Image (cartoon, rainbow, N blue to C red):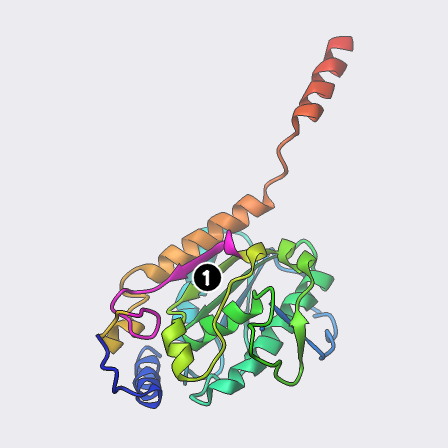
């Protein structure tokens, strides 16, 4: 178990080293921006990278999006990297919440048939977790630029949420960050992957190296498989209702 004398700052330093070697749903006051000149994709994978990873989706994010594409075969999967510092200055994660929420709302408005997959690793998993929130946690005020949860109808455009190494409540408490509560509109389509020995996401973990093992232990592929299956289910035509089947049978009987 991680020593109680190990400070959040030291954990953050360990976390930074690990992510380098592996190479509150909230709305905002920003506008939606202009429509992309690209055609709407079948799937928009929105990924938030981990602490200290270079801008982009990061190593684990790249493995996740590559696996997702392989699972979905010919479908056009476009990747969006959440734009935020991903630094050890954890309050700046709010910038990622704003950017991710804005992008989700933009895709829902411009590409209504596109299925979205929201995913993140480590600090990025916290960002995505906050993006799914249905309410502001008690006792916390809204950062500048965030107005509150996104409209409920936006959730209809999200096929799956994949969280890898999401910081635990214990860890978040140490850095004075609000707890993560996945909103009810997203909970049933969320996979939350945590290696038991990972001290960032597990209250009992004590091996910081485990925080970088999500590709090696297969959890990234498992999350991608889960998300791909959710995309396929949400893209399937609706099953006929009993009433529709009955009406069709009646019509055929009269023919």
Residue that protrudes farthest toward the top in the picture: 254
Figure check: 80 above or below 187: below
Compared across the picture, whether 80 is left or right of 2 comes to right
Question: Is 105 inside the magenta-drawn segment?
Answer: no
Residue 188 is one of the magenta-drawn residues: yes
The span shown in magenta is: 187-203
Whether 120 is drawn above or below 89: the answer is above
* Location of the C terminus (image quadrant): top right
Return the residue nearer the eye: 156 or 148: 148
With 90 as the anchor, is 250 left or right in this view? Answer: right
Residue 142 location in percent, x, y?
62, 80
Q: Secondary structure at mark 1?
A: strand
**Residue 25 at x, y percent in the picture:** 60, 67
Q: Which residue is mark 1?
A: 162
Residue located at (66% from left, 29% from top): 241
Count of all numbered marks drawn on residues in the image = 1
For mark 1, does the 10 Å Cα neighbourhood hold few (<14), some (14 to 19), or many (20 or more) residues?
A: many
On the image, the x and y values in percent for residue 9 come to: 35, 90
Which residue corresponds to the image point at 49% horizontal and 83% vertical from the top-left? Answer: 55
């Amino acid at each position: 178990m991680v020593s109680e004398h190990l400070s959040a700052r030291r954990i953050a330093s360990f976390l930074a080293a690990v992510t380098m070697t592996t190479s509150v749903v909230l709305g905002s006051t920003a506008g939606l921006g202009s429509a992309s000149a690209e055609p709407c994709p079948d799937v928009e994978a929105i990924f938030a990278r981990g602490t200290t990873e270079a801008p982009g989706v990061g190593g684990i994010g790249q493995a996740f999006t590559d696996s997702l594409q392989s699972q979905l075969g010919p479908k056009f999967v476009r990747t969006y990297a959440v734009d935020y510092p991903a630094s050890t200055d954890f309050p700046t994660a709010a910038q990622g919440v704003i950017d991710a929420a804005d992008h989700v709302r933009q895709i829902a408005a411009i590409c209504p048939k596109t299925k979205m997959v929201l995913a993140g690793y480590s600090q990025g998993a916290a960002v995505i977790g906050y993006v799914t929130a249905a309410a502001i946690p008690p006792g916390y005020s809204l950062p500048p630029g965030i107005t509150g949860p996104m409209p409920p109808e936006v959730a209809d455009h999200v096929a799956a949420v994949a969280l890898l190494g999401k910081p635990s409540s214990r860890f978040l408490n140490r850095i004075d960050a609000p707890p993560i509560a996945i909103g009810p509109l997203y909970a049933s389509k969320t996979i939350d992957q945590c290696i038991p020995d990972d001290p960032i996401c597990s209250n009992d973990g004590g091996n910081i190296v485990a925080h970088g093992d999500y590709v090696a232990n297969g959890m990234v592929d498992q999350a991608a498989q889960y998300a791909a299956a959710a995309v396929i289910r949400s893209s399937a035509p609706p099953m006929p209702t009993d009433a529709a089947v009955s009406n069709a049978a009646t019509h055929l009987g009269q023919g």
